[in-house]
Structure formats: C-alpha cells, structure tokens
Image: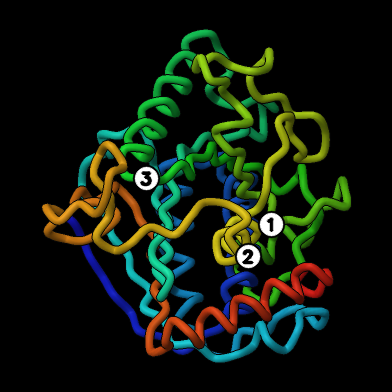
C-alpha cells in the first residue's frame, strides 16, 4: 500500500528555493561519504524536503527580494509505495497552483565518487537509461506534459563547499572538504532535460550521451532543483494543465480520472507542493511581480 502524508505549512517561495539548494548539498555530501545508491539518495532527498519544509523561519540569501519572503499557505504532500514505478522514473515533482498543475518526472543516476563515472556508463547501461527516459517521456506526454529529466547525484568533492542555512550532519562534514570549484553545492542534484539528451528519433544526441566536463559540470548542461522550481512557477518551462487533466489525445479534460490530475497512478516517490488560500487573481499578480524581479536578477 502507498504511504501518503499531507502537511499544511506557512512558508514562502524563498524558503522553498533555499530548501531545494540545501537538498543538492545534502545528497552530494551523503554520496561522497557513503557512496550511496540512487534509491536511497532519492528517499533521503524526499524526507529532508519534508523535514525542512515544516521548519519555521528558514533564512534565505540576503540578495533575495522581499517578495520571496511573502508568507504563503501550502500543502506539502509526500507519497511512496513499495514497488518501483512502472513508467521509467524514480521521482515525481507536482506543483499545484490556482493556474493549474505542472508535473515533472525524474530518472535518477549516480556519478560515482570513486570511479568518477556515471554508474550507468556502459553500453547496456546507456541502452537501459534511454529506454527509461523514452518510457517516462511518452507516458508524461500522454497527459499533456513534457517535463522529463535525468537527475544526476554528484559527489560534493566535485562542487564548492556548501554554506547553506539548512544543514545536516552530512553537510557539516562536507564543509571541511576542500572546494575544487566555484560551482554551488546545490548541483549535488543536477537535472538535465530530456530534450537535451535524446533527439526526435529517440537517439542519443551526444557520444557519450552524458559527459562530466569538470568540477560537477556536465555536457549537456544541467540545472538545480531550485532553478526547476522557479522555472515552473514563471512558466519558463512547461504549461499549466487543468486539474481535470487531458485525454490521451490531448483533446480535452479527462473526466474519468477519479483522483484528478496528474494521474491516478502514484509514483514510487513524489514531492507535492500545493498553494492554498489565494485567489487566481492574487496569484497572477504575485507571479507577475515575481517574474519582474527574476528579469532584474534579484532571485539568484
């Protein structure tokens, strides 16, 4: 049976961005210290998100605009189940606002701190990964979304020393490690979009398909979890889908979905963020202001 939990919290977009950055540092530190596998790291990422999201007064960087501190009521939801997802991905991220819902799916892989290679770096490994990415993308598109990503866990030794407001034992230990680059530790969880990896014929665009360039940087280039969140909010990626969902052919709302959009299937792991107690008009005004400060580079 799936494990479902909902938590109603008073938080802010700034706090969530800080938490997302801290998650990258946390999993990167744990990978460095314990050579942990991707399933355990994904479980840990989800659990730490819920622990931190319920903490009041999380500090944010001084350069963040005051608008990012505006209190918002959100329901943070967690779901896990005993079996792996049937649709090629390890983690779902669901964002529910008055504009509708966006849903991203991520297939997780580990960049090994000892071998300095992705653990899928073999002929059979790349074949399996492409089939997983293709499966999750096709399934996601059938619901009107295309937010599919490869999630790479990167050891902290490849990244800058984390100096983040939200800390754990692993991050504290990692602060004693000598930084090897100026890259932020948030890239301990690096996301590469499907379209950067596979072409229209579902073949790899590059050889090798993913290459570590230096200091935690990859080709194709990736983004952080916090960047994904702000891109989803500001519609730099994806489009809002009505809560009723869409028919498989994209023709209109799917009224047969008993549990609402996005799916009546529960993924192996899911992070859900739902904005509550705000009208659509108020939300639109807020996002318009947020977009303005983003364009003026006041978010980070």
Residue at 58% of width from left, 52% of height from top?
Answer: 237
What's the mark number on residue 186? 1
- Is residue 192 shown left or right of residue 259? right
- Is residue 9 shown left or right of residue 71? left
Residue 164 visible, this angle: yes
Q: CA distance from mark 2 to mark 1?
A: 6 Å
| SS category of the residue bearing label 3 | loop
What's the mark number on residue 22? 2
The answer to whether residue 69 is above or below residue 81 is below
Among the two numbered marks 1 and 3 on one chain, the one whose residue lies closer to the N terminus: 3
Residue at 30% of width from left, 34% of height from top?
Answer: 87
| Depth order, front residue of 20/45 | 20
Q: Quadrant of residue 205?
A: top right
The image shows residue 14 at horizontal and vertical percentages of 64, 78
The residue under label 3 is 144
Q: CA distance from mark 3 to mark 2?
A: 31 Å
Comparing marks 1 and 3, which lies closer to the viewer?
3
Q: How many marks?
A: 3
What's the mark number on residue 72? none
């Amino acid at each position: 049976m799936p494990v479902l939990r909902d938590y109603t919290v008073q938080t802010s977009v700034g706090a969530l961005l800080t938490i997302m950055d801290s998650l990258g540092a946390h999993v990167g530190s744990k990978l460095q210290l314990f050579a942990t596998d991707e399933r355990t790291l994904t479980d840990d990422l989800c659990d730490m998100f819920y622990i931190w999201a319920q903490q009041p007064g999380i500090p944010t960087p001084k350069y963040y605009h005051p608008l990012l501190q505006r209190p918002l009521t959100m329901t943070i939801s967690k779901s896990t189940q005993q079996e792996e997802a049937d649709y090629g991905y390890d983690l779902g991220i669901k964002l529910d606002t008055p504009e509708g819902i966006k849903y991203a799916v991520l297939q997780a892989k580990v960049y090994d701190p000892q071998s300095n290679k992705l653990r899928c770096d073999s002929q059979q490994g790349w074949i399996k990964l492409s089939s997983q990415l293709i499966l999750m993308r096709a399934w996601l598109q059938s619901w009107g979304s295309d937010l599919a990503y490869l999630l790479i866990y990167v050891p902290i030794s490849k990244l800058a020393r984390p100096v983040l407001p939200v800390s754990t034992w692993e991050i504290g230990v990692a602060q004693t490690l000598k930084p090897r680059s100026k890259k932020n530790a948030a890239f301990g969880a690096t996301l590469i979009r499907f379209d950067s990896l596979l072409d229209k014929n579902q073949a790899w665009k590059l050889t090798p398909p993913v290459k570590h360039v230096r200091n935690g940087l990859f080709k194709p280039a990736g983004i952080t979890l916090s960047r994904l969140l702000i891109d989803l909010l500001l519609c730099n990626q994806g489009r809002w889908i009505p809560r009723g969902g869409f028919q498989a052919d994209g023709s209109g709302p799917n009224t047969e979905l008993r549990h609402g959009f996005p799916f009546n299937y529960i993924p192996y792991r899911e992070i859900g963020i739902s904005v509550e107690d705000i009208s659509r008009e108020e939300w639109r005004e807020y996002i318009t202001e947020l977009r303005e400060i983003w364009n003026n580079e006041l978010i980070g």
